């Protein structure tokens, strides 16, 4: 987990890391650092790393990272779910 955070926080320079989808799980990604380290992460690792605690925002981010690729809904439906989640997230922050 530390390796992905270091890679992503390195000025978001795409030359410092690559991301590869894990074929067995559509939510997992392999992050390969330029330094040779790699790790497998999923959306929940990212949510934890960025300390996202609002459940509606968590839902929104998961949808945004996987728009149209989960197999349940098309991109248009996922985008509407993202909008709905943003509205709900705002309500929860009151």
Image (tube, rainbow, N blue to C red):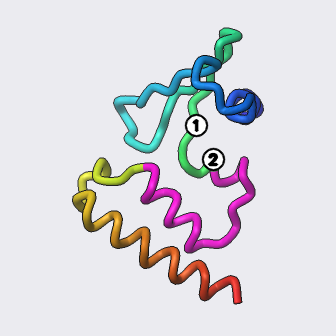
Q: Which residues are magenta?
A: 47-65
Q: Name the N-terminal-most of marks 1 and 2.
A: 1
Q: Is residue 26 magenta?
A: no
> Residue 90 appears at what percent x and percent y?
61, 82
Residue at the image point whose x is 59% and y is 18% from the top: 15
Marks 1, 2: nearer the viewer: 2
Q: As displayed, is residue 17 above or below residue 73?
A: above
Q: Is residue 6 left or right of residue 69?
A: right
> Residue 76 appears at what percent x and percent y?
25, 64
Name the dominant secondary structure of the magenta segment.
helix
Q: As displayed, is residue 57 above or below residue 18?
A: below
Q: Quadrant of the C terminus?
A: bottom right
* Location of mark 2 (residue): 46
* Location of mark 1 (residue): 41
In the rendered picture of this protein, how many numbered marks are placed on residues? 2
Residue at the image point whose x is 30% and y is 48% from the top: 69
Q: Is residue 13 left or right of residue 59?
A: right
Q: Is residue 52 magenta?
A: yes
* Residue in the foreground of this view, choosing between 1 and 92: 92
Residue 21 image-quadrant placement: top left
Q: Quadrant of the N terminus?
A: top right
Residue at the image point whose x is 64% and y is 54% from the top: 47
């Amino acid at each position: 987990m530390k390796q992905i955070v270091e890679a992503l926080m390195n000025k978001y320079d795409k030359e410092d890391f690559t991301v590869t989808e894990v074929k067995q799980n559509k939510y997992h990604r392999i992050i390969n650092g330029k330094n040779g380290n790699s790790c497998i992460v999923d959306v929940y690792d990212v949510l934890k790393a960025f300390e996202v605690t609002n459940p509606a925002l968590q839902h929104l981010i998961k949808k945004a990272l996987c728009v149209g690729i989960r197999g349940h809904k098309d991109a248009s439906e996922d985008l509407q779910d993202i909008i709905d989640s943003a509205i709900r997230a705002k309500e929860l922050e009151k």
